[in-house]
Amino acid sequence: RIVSRAFEGMTPLARHRAVYAALGTLMQTDIHALSIDAKAPEEEQ
């Protein structure tokens, strides 16, 4: 789970793209699969 103000106003797809962009080449070399739960602070329960 990732909670960040950076996700405010972003669609779920845009949030996933932002996480993948932050991981860079790790997704191609070191990480096989990833489950993403990205939320803005006001969405956190």
Image (tube, rainbow, N blue to C red):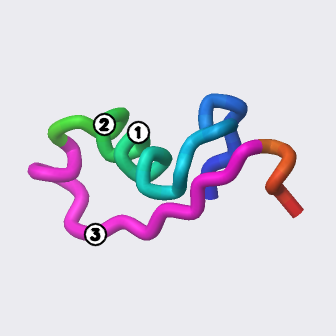
- Residue nearest the viewer, comparing 39 with 35: 39
| Residue type beneath disc 2 | Ala
Local SS, label 1:
helix
Above or below, 6 against 42 in this view is above
**35 is higher (above) or lower (below) than 8:** below
- Quadrant placement of the N terminus: bottom right
Q: Residue at x 21, y 66 (%)?
A: 32
The majority secondary structure of the magenta stretch comes to: loop
Q: Are marks 3 and 2 in contact (CB under 8 Å)?
A: no
The reply, left or right, for residue 4 in relation to residue 11 is: right
Task: Check contact, mark 1 vs mark 3: CB within 8 A.
Answer: no
Q: Which residue is mark 1?
A: 18
Q: Residue at x 28, y 69 (%)?
A: 33
Q: Which mark is residue 21?
A: 2
Q: Are marks 1 and 2 in contact (CB under 8 Å)?
A: yes
Mark 1 neighbour density, 10 Å: few (under 14) some (14–19) many (20 or more): some
Which of disc 3 and disc 1 is earlier in sequence? 1
Residue 45 image-quadrant placement:
bottom right
On the picture, is 2 further left or further right than 24?
right
Is residue 36 located in the magenta-colored stretch of the structure?
A: yes
Q: Which residues are magenta?
A: 26-40
Q: How many marks?
A: 3
How far separated are the C-alphas under marks 1 and 2? 5 Å
User: Which numbered disc covers residue 33?
Assistant: 3
Q: Secondary structure at mark 3?
A: loop
Q: Amino acid at mark 3?
A: Ala
Q: Residue at x 59, y 54 (%)?
A: 38
- Residue 1 is inside the magenta segment: no
Determine the CA span between mark 3 and mark 2. 15 Å
Mark 1 to mark 3: distance in Å? 16 Å
